[in-house]
Amino acid sequence: MVSTQDDELNQLREQRRLALQKQIEQQAANQVDAEVKAQEAQRISQNLDAAMKKLLTPDARSRLSAITMATPERAEMIKQSIVQLHGQGKLNTLMTDEQLKQLLLSQSKSRRSASIRRI
């Protein structure tokens, strides 16, 4: 009877060891995937930054960096729009600050249509 209990105990220990090993392997795989995604995002961001140096005037880059500090997500969308404009051939020269302002206005949500009701 003691040997049966020992066998069951050893079997449970082995199952638990295998389960823990599987869990650790899964966590390691998830961490590797996250690191790969982070490196890819960083590479894309660096490519966009390099493109902005070639496509924007210093004033426009300054405005875009201010936007990046305030809302990084919006700045990324703007950078992608600028690259798309260049790719479509609509941006042949350096984008000036005024042109960037126009792009920002075209992409911003209209605040003029908001109404205020007093109760």
Image (cartoon, grey):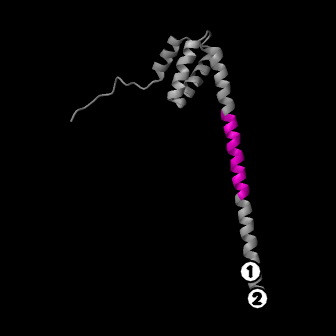
Q: At 54% across and 26% down in the image, what residue appears? A: 68
Residue at image location 66% in from the left, 34% down from the top: 41
Q: Amino acid at mark 2?
A: Val
Q: Quadrant of the N terminus?
A: bottom right
The percent position of residue 20, horizontal first and vertical second, equals 71, 63
Task: Give the residue pinned by disc 1.
Answer: 8
Q: Secondary structure at mark 2?
A: helix
Q: Is residue 35 magenta?
A: yes
The answer to whether 60 appears left or right of 27 in the picture is left
The three-letter amino acid code for the residue at tag 1 is Glu
Q: Residue 85's spot in the image, x, y percent?
A: 59, 18
What residue is pinned by disc 2?
A: 2
Residue 55's image quarter?
A: top right
Q: Nearer the viewer, residue 63 or 110?
A: 63
The answer to which image quadrant residue 14 occupies is bottom right
Q: Position of residue 39 (x, y in %)?
A: 70, 36
- Tell me if mark 1 has few (under 14), some (14-19) or many (20+) residues whose alpha carbon lies within 10 angstroms of its own: few
Q: Callout 1: helix, strand or loop? A: helix
Q: Position of residue 108 (x, y in %)?
A: 45, 24
Is the residue 85 above or below the residue 19 in the image? above
Q: Earlier in the sequence, mark 1 or mark 2?
A: 2
Q: Which residues are magenta?
A: 24-41
Q: Is residue 118 above or below residue 18?
A: above
Determine whether 98 is above or below 24 in the image.
Answer: above
> Residue at the spot x=77%, y=81% of the render?
7
86 lies left or right of 67: right
